Image (cartoon, grey):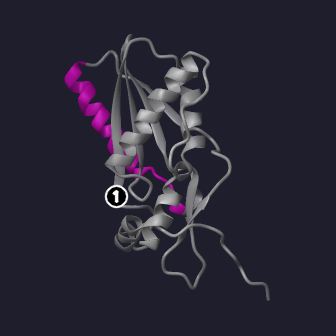
Amino acid sequence: MSKQVIEGYQLSPQQKHLWSLYGGGEQMPYTAQCAILIEGPLSREILNMALRQVIERHEILRTTFDFLADMTVPLQVISSRGGELPIDEYDLSDLSEHAQEMQVEALLRDAARRLRPLEEGNQVRFIEVLLAPQKHMLLVSLPSLYADSVALKILMQDLGECYAACLKDEASPEEPIQYADLSEWQNES
């Protein structure tokens, strides 16, 4: 009989706490979300390139949570590839500002409900919303096991820097600190 092995990283203390609240249901009950207002021209091609770079640069966005039958807490397993990049697009430009706000809130609620089981990966969901010809909103949704408000801020700052670099056909900014490394450090303390 062969012994199964998983190679991965320990969960951070925050992730362990969230996992204990999770209870192993279909999806993570807590979601991290943000909305980024983009004013001015938006190149969807450049946005796609920048989003792919962010996924490649941040291992947590390519992470699954796997465990064997005898484990109660999973390990973070990082995929070398980002996989598909699902970006849903919505045109709300014909709606009033109030109706746009209501629809954006509905899109965020729906994105939280449509997250995949944690073992499948590709957890981040991007939604690009056209509000006016020179006004867009990028909605980002992922389980809280992957990010909190600070991590979302870092991810979105990196997205802005990657978008600017892609526009100028320059190299990406300096590599970020990886969450799995931070998690290991926190577990050593």
Q: Residue at x 46, y 52 (%)?
A: 115
- In the picture, measured across the screen, residue 170 lies left or right of residue 73, that is right
**Which quarter of the rendered picture does the C terminus lie within?**
bottom left
Q: Residue at x 46, y 16 (%)?
A: 42
Furthest residue toward left: 98
Residue 167: percent from the left, percent from the top? 55, 17
Residue 53: percent from the left, percent from the top? 58, 35
Furthest residue toward bottom: 1
Which residue type carries mark 1?
Tyr
Residue 49: percent from the left, percent from the top? 59, 28
Q: Residue at x 33, y 45 (%)?
A: 109
Q: Residue at x 60, y 78 (%)?
A: 68
Q: Considering the whole magenta stretch, tell me its main secondary structure.
A: helix
Residue interval drawn in magenta: 96-118
The secondary structure type at the circle numbered 1 is: loop
User: Which one is nearer the viewer's eye here, 97 or 181?
Assistant: 181
- Residue 165 located within the stretch drawn in magenta: no
Q: Disc 1 designates what residue?
A: 30
- In the picture, measured across the screen, residue 92 lies left or right of residue 68, that is left
**Which quarter of the rendered picture does the N terminus lie within?**
bottom right
Residue 44: percent from the left, percent from the top? 53, 21
- Residue 101 located within the stretch drawn in magenta: yes
User: Which one is nearer the viewer's eye here, 17 or 172?
Assistant: 172
- In the picture, measured across the screen, residue 127 lies left or right of residue 4, that is left
